[in-house]
Amino acid sequence: MDEFDKFTPRKMALLKNLMQVVNPCVRKAHQKNYRPLPRVASFIATSNQKELLTDPTGSRRFLCVEIENKIDCSPLDYRQLYAQLKAELLAGERYWFTSEEEAEIMAANESYYKHPVEEDVFRTYFRPAEYGEKALMLSAAEIFQRLKKHNPAAMRSVSAGNFGKFLSSLGIERKHTESGNYYRVVALV
């Protein structure tokens, strides 16, 4: 797959779903019915951009590698490769990642995430409060309004209704009170 970074976040979600479906069903051109297909392949993609992953929860499906040298394009001995893979499978070798390996993959993929603009704006004006540190207790709406006041152009496409979920995704500590949810933050400006 060429130019992986050209996919929109919505299409990335579809791709992620396709990668995890055990028995994908497709309707081929000029066909009336969907037919199940065996899941027999993975894919390789290229990108000229480094920030290309949009969903941290699904990044364990991607093994991101930066190419530092010219790629060796000499032909592979596929018969030998498949024979080796078959022998390993028949010998009971593990063909899946452990949860520890998945955590390593996700950590290695950190530098490949495409961060939303609201995260950059948030980190310019606030940071999460440390344990025991004196902090502001602000609602998601209050933080949103402050950010919108500082950078209206960047916050124009951000939904105020989903901003609390966004703050939680950043790991900002939330306190539930009688008057609503408040987030512990420290103002930087």
Image (tube, grey):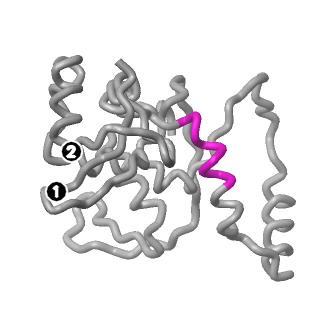
Q: Is residue 7 magenta?
A: no
Snapshot quadrant of residue 170: top left
Q: Which span is picked out in magenta? A: 104-112
Horizontal and vertical percent position of residue 141: 16, 40
Q: Name the residue beneath numbered marker 2.
A: 139
Mark found first going from the N terminus, 1 or 2: 2
Horizontal and vertical percent position of residue 146: 20, 27
Near mark 1 (Cα within 10 A), the count class, few <14, some 14-19 or many ≥20, is few
What secondary structure is found at the residue carrying circle 2? loop
The secondary structure that dominates the magenta segment is helix
88 with respect to 115 (left or right): right
Q: Name the residue beneath numbered marker 1.
A: 180
Near mark 2 (Cα within 10 A), the count class, few <14, some 14-19 or many ≥20, is some
Q: Is residue 75 above or below residue 22?
A: above
Q: Type of residue at label 1?
A: Gly
Dot 1 and dot 2 residues touching (CB under 8 Å): yes
Residue at 17% in and 30% down: 157
Residue at 35% in and 51% down: 168
Q: Is residue 75 above or below residue 32?
A: above
Q: Type of residue at label 2?
A: Ser
